[in-house]
């Protein structure tokens, strides 16, 4: 024990010195601040930064820059971007940013194969497999700021590439008891059949309105969007810059589900056994 | 050996180790920062993003609001400075064009006479 005593003093000195050194390095003379990274921004500025990335991408279509910028935020996967786009639309935020987020979500997801669009559309929200696509990542909430609008123009200004003319090519009732709740499904495609993400839509009814945008559910189609409707209300859907409007949409009443399903009684959905409320499917072509 | 000497040597070594740890291994990290504290390369990219967005929406007010987050009064000068840095670094011409267009418009509108008497 006596032999170890000198070393004990050394250890005591080391510990004391370490505490002093650490205090000096952290409190008295901290390492020189070389500037913050975007990830260390206050939540409101962080959200603004992310929206700026999306707006810039929407403006330029430069995916390389967008990828590099998004790489600073590892938590921003396709699901999170899609979720953010929904938040921005729901809160009436900048529409170009919402479109950019939706487009980025689709582009980043393109690397993974998606299930058959038609099959997915047919079952939409009703099947558990679709529900399970909501990952913990998509529940991440970021603070989305909205800048003061002192000089903000009241209407959206579209660039020539984002100001397409949309033509309604198909409007049909969907009597599928598995689609609950009833909704208006929208598919926007180009002339060669490619889904178009980031297209802004507006649903209006007496006493209310709401916005939605294509590309929020890229697992169905990049050009897909839907809006839940209530039976008895008359809806109007406006797409893009407002020149194309689909009016008088009310949730249709569909015959008993057993007839549609070939005698099999559905185990889920509103149509179990009797007439049920159906949905609408609108298809637009971007000209 | 004198125990005070050992204590002193241990303390000196400890101070060196502690300072090294505090500066290099686990330096102080800054959170809850604002855009004006961004590192120069991120500030420059922030300005470029504003210019890219402006090239599409032509909303000079929004661009000015966003740029003002960087804490500089001369917004046109700030954008022009970034344009020059990008030119020197060999960034694509279209980036520089966007920056210059924004700088020109900021300069033009900031020098307009005030409507107030």
Image: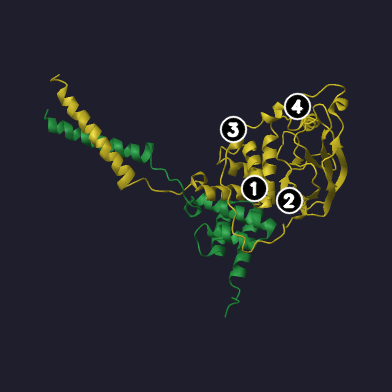
Image location (x, y in percent) of residue A94: 65, 53
Residue A169: quarter of image = top right
Labels 2 and 4: the sequence-earlier one: 2
State the residue position of label 1. A88
How packed mark 3 is, by other alpha carbons closer than 10 Å (few <14, some 14-19, many 20 or more), is few
Residue A157: quarter of image = bottom right
- Residue B76's place in the image compared with A99, above or below, is below
Labels 3 and 4: the sequence-earlier one: 3
For mark 1, give the secondary structure: helix
- Residue A84's place in the image compared with A262, above or below, is below
State the residue position of label 2. A209
Labels 1 and 3: the sequence-earlier one: 1
Labels 4 and 1: the sequence-earlier one: 1
Mark nearest the camera among 4 and 1 is 4
Labels 3 and 2: the sequence-earlier one: 3
Q: Which chain is green?
A: B
Mark nearest the camera among 3 and 4 is 4
Residue farthest bottom in this picture = B117
* Inter-mark Cα distance, 1 to 3: 19 Å
Q: Is residue B103 left or right of residue B57?
A: left
Whether discs 3 and 2 lie on one chain: the answer is: yes
User: Mark 2 — on which chain does it sit?
Assistant: A
Whether discs 1 and 2 lie on one chain: the answer is: yes
Find chain A in the image and tell me its colour: yellow
State the residue position of label 4. A268
User: Mark 3 — on which chain does it sit?
Assistant: A
Image location (x, y in percent) of residue B6: 16, 31
* Inter-mark Cα distance, 2 to 4: 29 Å
Residue B95: quarter of image = bottom right
Disc 1 and disc 2 in contact, CB within 8 angstroms = no
Seen at 80% across and 44% down, the residue is A232
């Amino acid at each position: 024990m006596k032999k170890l005593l000198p070393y004990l003093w050394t250890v005591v000195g080391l510990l004391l010195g370490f505490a002093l050194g650490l205090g000096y390095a952290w409190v008295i003379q901290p390492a020189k601040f070389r500037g913050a990274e975007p990830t260390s921004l206050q939540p409101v500025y962080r959200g603004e930064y992310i929206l700026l990335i999306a707006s810039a991408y929407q403006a330029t279509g430069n995916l390389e820059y967008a990828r590099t910028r998004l790489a600073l935020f590892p938590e921003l996967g396709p699901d999170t971007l899609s979720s953010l786009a929904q938040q921005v639309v729901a809160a009436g935020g900048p529409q170009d940013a919402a479109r950019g987020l939706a487009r980025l979500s689709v582009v980043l997801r393109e690397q993974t194969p998606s299930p058959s669009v038609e099959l997915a559309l047919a079952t939409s929200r009703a099947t558990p497999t679709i529900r399970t696509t909501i990952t913990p990542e998509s529940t991440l909430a970021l603070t989305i700021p909205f800048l003061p609008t002192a000089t903000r123009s009241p209407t959206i200004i579209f660039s020539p590439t984002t100001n397409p003319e949309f033509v309604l090519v198909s409007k049909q009732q969907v009597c599928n008891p598995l689609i609950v709740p009833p909704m208006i499904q929208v598919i926007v495609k180009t002339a060669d059949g490619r889904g178009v993400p980031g297209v802004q839509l507006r649903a209006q009814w007496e006493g209310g309105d709401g916005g939605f945008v294509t590309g929020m559910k890229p697992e169905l189609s990049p050009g897909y969007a839907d809006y839940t409707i209530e039976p008895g209300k008359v809806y109007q859907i406006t797409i893009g810059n407002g020149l194309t409007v689909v009016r008088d949409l009310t949730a249709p009443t569909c015959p008993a589900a057993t007839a549609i399903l070939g005698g099999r009684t559905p185990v889920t959905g509103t149509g179990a056994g009797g007439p049920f409320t159906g949905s609408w499917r609108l298809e637009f072509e971007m000209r | 050996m004198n125990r005070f000497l050992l204590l002193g040597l241990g303390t000196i070594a400890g101070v060196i180790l502690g300072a090294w740890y505090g500066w290099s291994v686990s330096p102080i990290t800054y959170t809850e920062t604002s855009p004006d504290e961004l590192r120069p390369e991120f500030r420059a990219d922030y300005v470029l993003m504003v210019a890219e967005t402006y090239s599409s929406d032509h909303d000079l007010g929004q661009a000015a609001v966003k740029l003002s987050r960087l804490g500089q009064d001369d917004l046109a000068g700030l954008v022009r400075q970034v344009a020059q840095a990008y030119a020197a670094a060999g960034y694509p011409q279209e980036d520089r064009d966007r920056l210059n267009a924004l700088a020109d418009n900021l300069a033009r509108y900031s020098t307009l006479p005030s409507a107030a008497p």
